[in-house]
Amino acid sequence: MTDTTLPDEIKRWTAPRRAALVLQILRGELTTAKAARQYHLTPAEIESWQHAFLEAGTNGLKTNPNDELLEKDKKIDHLHRKIGQMTMELEVLQHANTMLQDAHTSKSVSAALFGPGNASND
């Protein structure tokens, strides 16, 4: 991003435009209050952009910036394993429920055919 000048009228604040504004403020070329008035933004909005910009910069200066990505990948893997486990448990419960319903239906059919107490599985 070589051109850090911003047009006076901005309809859409893309990431490069927000970064250019934040850099102007950090370099002392513009104050937050003046930028808010000039671009019809709130100071809080600009400050949140500054915070996000500086936080991202902090992550870039870490010894291993991929640590955060690795942590997220580990969490995703853990959640996928948990989903798999819960899916298997659900399938076992559904199978058990089907077996119980079949057993109950079999006894009812036997009782209807042979009378109560005369069913072959009793």
Image (spheres, rainbow, N blue to C red):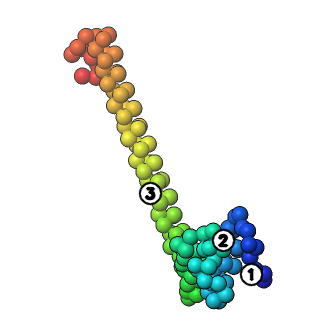
Q: Name the residue tied to disc 1.
A: 4
Q: CA distance from mark 3 to mark 2?
A: 48 Å
Q: Could you say where residue 63 lies in the image, as x and y percent from the top left?
A: 56, 88
Residue under the image location 44 percent in, 42 percent down: 91
Q: Name the residue tied to disc 2.
A: 39
Secondary structure at badge 2 equals: helix
- Give the residue type at disc 1: Thr
- Looking at the rendered image, the quarter that the N terminus falls into is bottom right
Determine the image quadrant of residue 64.
bottom right
Q: Given contact means CB atoms under 8 Å apart, are the residues at marks 3 and 1 in contact?
A: no
Q: Residue furthest right?
A: 3
| Mark 2 closeness class: few <14, some 14–19, many ≥20 residues within 10 Å | some
> Could you tell which of marks 3 and 2 lies nearer the N-terminus?
2
- Give the residue type at disc 3: Lys
In the rendered image, the vertical position of residue 96 relative to residue 29, given as above or below: above
Mark 3 or mark 1, whichever is nearer to me:
1
